[in-house]
Amino acid sequence: MTDTKTSFNYEIIARLFEDAVCLTYNPIESPAAWQFAKELSKDFQKQHKGQHCRLCSKTSRIMQDRYNPHFHYFSDGTLIHYCYPDDEKSSELQRNLSDELKRIYRLLKIRGLPVKKVYFPQTTMDFIYYSEFLRYISEQAFIRYSFKTDLFVEPLPDKDDFVRECFAGNNILVTAAKGENLPYCRDFMALFADGRYYISEKYASPFGAANHGKISLFKRDYMRFYPYCDMQYVPQEYIDALYEKAKEFDWYVSPEEAAEHRQTITDEASVKMNDYINKLFENRTCLTITNPDFNSTYMAPDFQQYAVFSDGTVVSVYYDENDKSFLNDLRKLFPDLNFRFEKVSAEYIKQIYRRLPEFQKGAAVIYIEMLKQKARKLKRITDLKHIEALDVVANIAGWQNWHSVKIEDDAHARQLIDAEKWRRNMAAGFNAENPLEEEYRQYLKHHK
């Protein structure tokens, strides 16, 4: 492998595309390609009576984040990344590597992709340039390799073959491995060292009953440390089988052991935090129990980690009065408040919302009340009995029936409330006076 000090530029990129193939771009980067991929999957399922399939690329070997690639690799062994050693004077790339870069090398090694030449930032300013270069490479690859001829679907292997394929070549399931400080996510996803990233198909819809917010939170907090491919959906039984198989390896860690080793707040810090939260809820209420703007996850408190209170206090991890863009968004949402910011750690925000139901009505209670009110309205416009209306309303929301409604936490409830508002808005486009009539009509249409 050659560590290069050559100044990287657009001419080098042009030569790379002439002499080699980019194996790390995302072929479904554009909305048109994404829609094309969806149509491929639909056509396959129609032809094969609902059989599961997976999307593949003839060119790309590693599908990264669509808009923020961490690195690019070409078929001639050239690696371009935006990580640089802690010691910028070091002449060896392998000295003082960041965890992110270690993962990139491990990923390429497992995939059998040898690194022969490397371009990487030499200074902090280079980091910015390299980020731009990586995005430019993605754009050029998307232009040069037509998604209409590149993308195809193939049958998803049966469960046993799928599991063998995932663990081939000493591949490690990092979401069940020792030394990985990851949250508990085994019930809905599996992330491998070679870039495989699988999500249970029941989480496929952001407006369904499953907690799709879990995936968004994971991507926000952890995927930047795991520069891997875009996710693919598989049946839940496949996810369960992967974790069952993982128990056979010496790197496996049980959920209980993982929880013990995960960083926790000290008792003294916990007392201090709870005192702070108790004072927060004295003579004031939280106004961000539900997401203030359901059209954009940007303002969701679970993603941006903040809480707004009735006296104008804004408790935040990231923001203060100097963040003009965020402050302007708050002013649009809460025009009558004079804001005062208080900076806290992320654990404080989690505990504020976790403890919120102790002081006022929480999002989970609000969501259940929304469904019950919706069921009462449905009874008035149909001849359904009370329990039948509850079951229909639950079914429209994505649950099997009323008794299956299970709210995991208030963050989940906020997501579900957003979904209810979204469904109402969609239905209002057809029946503005009574959107519920349209929702019920669609329900009958799809549940005959």
Image (cartoon, helix red, strand yellow):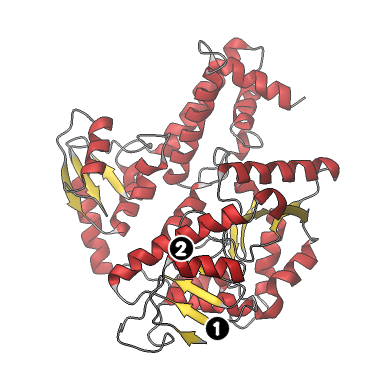
Give me the C-alpha separation between circle 1 and circle 2. 18 Å
Q: 382 or 223: nearer the eye? A: 223
**Residue in view at x 71 percent, y 76 percent:** 168
> Along the horizontal axis of the image, is 87 left or right of 429?
left
Q: Residue 170: give its label.
A: none
Q: Residues within 10 Å of mark 2 (few under 14, many from 20)?
A: many
Q: Residues within 10 Å of mark 1 (few under 14, many from 20)?
A: few
Q: Amino acid at mark 1?
A: Lys
Task: Locate residue 352, reporting x and y percent.
Answer: 30, 49
250, above or below 154, in the image: below
Q: For mark 2, what is the residue?
A: 134
- Of helix, strand and loop, which one carries label 1? loop
Q: Residue 116: give its label.
A: 1
Of label 1 and label 2, which has the lower sequence position? 1
> Along the horizontal axis of the image, is 190 left or right of 367?
right
**Residue in view at x 75 percent, y 52 percent:** 53
337, above or below 406, in the image: above
Q: 274 or 56: nearer the eye? A: 56
Task: Locate residue 160, reporting x and y percent.
Answer: 79, 66
Quarter where residue 43 is shown: top right
Residue reaching furthest to the right: 48
> Along the horizontal axis of the image, is 295 left or right of 434?
left
Task: Locate residue 142, reporting x and y percent.
Answer: 58, 54
The C terminus lies in which quarter of the figure? Answer: top right
**Residue in view at x 35 percent, y 53 percent:** 350
Q: Amino acid at mark 2?
A: Leu
> Along the horizontal axis of the image, is 131 left or right of 175?
left
396, above or below 223, in the image: above
Quarter where residue 394 is shown: top right
Report the number of numbered marks.
2
